[in-house]
Amino acid sequence: MHDKLPLSPEFYANSDVVLLARKLIGKTLIVMRDGQRREAVITETEAYAGITDRASHAWGGRFTSRTEVMYRRGGLAYVYLCYGLHSLFNVVTGPEGTPHAILLRGVYPVLNDAKMNFGNQVPDDLRKAGNGPGKLSRLMGIDRDMNGADLCSGSDVWITGTGIEIMEDDISVSTRIGIGYAGKDAGLPYRFFIDRAVAEQAIKKTGYF
C-alpha cells in the first residue's frame, strides 16, 4: 500500500471541471518511472470544458483517435504531443461521455528522501523546474506512453490529496495561456495558480525538505 493514496474515482467524476481545476492546486502528482519515484506539488492548472469550450480539443463534439480518451470516465491521463516536441499532461474529469480535461501547467518538486529521484536531465536548481507544461512532463518523466493511464490505480502515475495547505486567497485566477484562437472562450477565467514562493514555503512547513 502506498503512503500517499490516489484520489478516488468519485473526485474525478464531478462534472464541474472548473471547480476540480481549482481543487487540484496544492495536491501532489506522483510518477513511478524506471524504478524512480518523483513527487511534485501542483501549482498551476487550466480547465477545458469539453464540447462547449472552443479551446478544448473536444469542442463541438470532436472525436478522434487523439481525443477518444477524453470521452472515457474521469480519472484517466490524457497526454498529447504539442508542436511535435512536448508531451502535455492532462487529467480527464467528469462522467463517461463528457470530455472534460484539466491541463497541469506547473508543479513544484518535493525534495523529501532517497525514494525520489529526478534523474540526470533536471537543472541543478529543482525549484525552478516544472514551471510550464512541457517542463513539467520532462521533470516528471511523463510521455505519450502514459496516455490513458488510470490515475486511481496508484501504479505508474497518480495524484494524491496529500499535499500542502494553502489559503484560498493564495490561489490566483486568470484567463488561459496561448489560446487566442478560442474567440470569446479565450477570456474565460479557467486558469488557477499559486506563486512559487508560496508553494515553497508551504512545502517547507510539511517537512518535505
Image: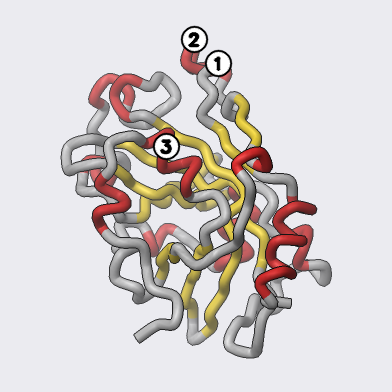
Q: Which residue is mark 3?
A: 19
Specify the amino acid type for callout 2: Lys
At 49% from the left edge and 69% from the top edge, which residue is drawn? 30
Determine the residue located farthest toward the left in the rendered image. Answer: 97
Q: Residue at x 20, y 47 (%)?
A: 72
Amino acid carrying label 1: it is Gly
> Pointer 2: residues within 10 angstroms few (<14), some, or many (20+)?
few
Q: How many labels, in total?
A: 3
Task: Left or right? Give the position of 73 relative to 177.
Answer: left
User: Quarter holding the C terminus?
Assistant: bottom right
Question: Which residue in the rendered view is the most extreme toward the bottom?
Answer: 114
- Asked if residue 35 is positioned above or below residue 100 in the image, the reply reads below
Where residue 120 sits: x, y (%)? 70, 78
Q: Quadrant of the N terminus?
A: bottom left
Q: Position of residue 79 (x, y in %)?
A: 42, 51
Question: Looking at the image, is 203 positioned above or below residue 14?
Answer: below
User: In the image, which disc is placed on residue 184?
Assistant: 2
**Disc 3: CA contacts within 10 A as few (<14), some (14-19) or many (>=20):** few
Check disc 1: other Cα within 10 Å, few if <14, some if 14-19, many if 20+: few
Say what secondary structure mark 1 lies in: helix
Q: Which residue is mark 1?
A: 187
The front one of 180 and 19 is 19
Q: Residue at (46%, 41%) from the top-left corner?
A: 21
Q: Earlier in the sequence, mark 3 or mark 2?
A: 3
Classify residue 146 as left or right of residue 103. Answer: left
Helix, strand or loop at label 2? It is helix
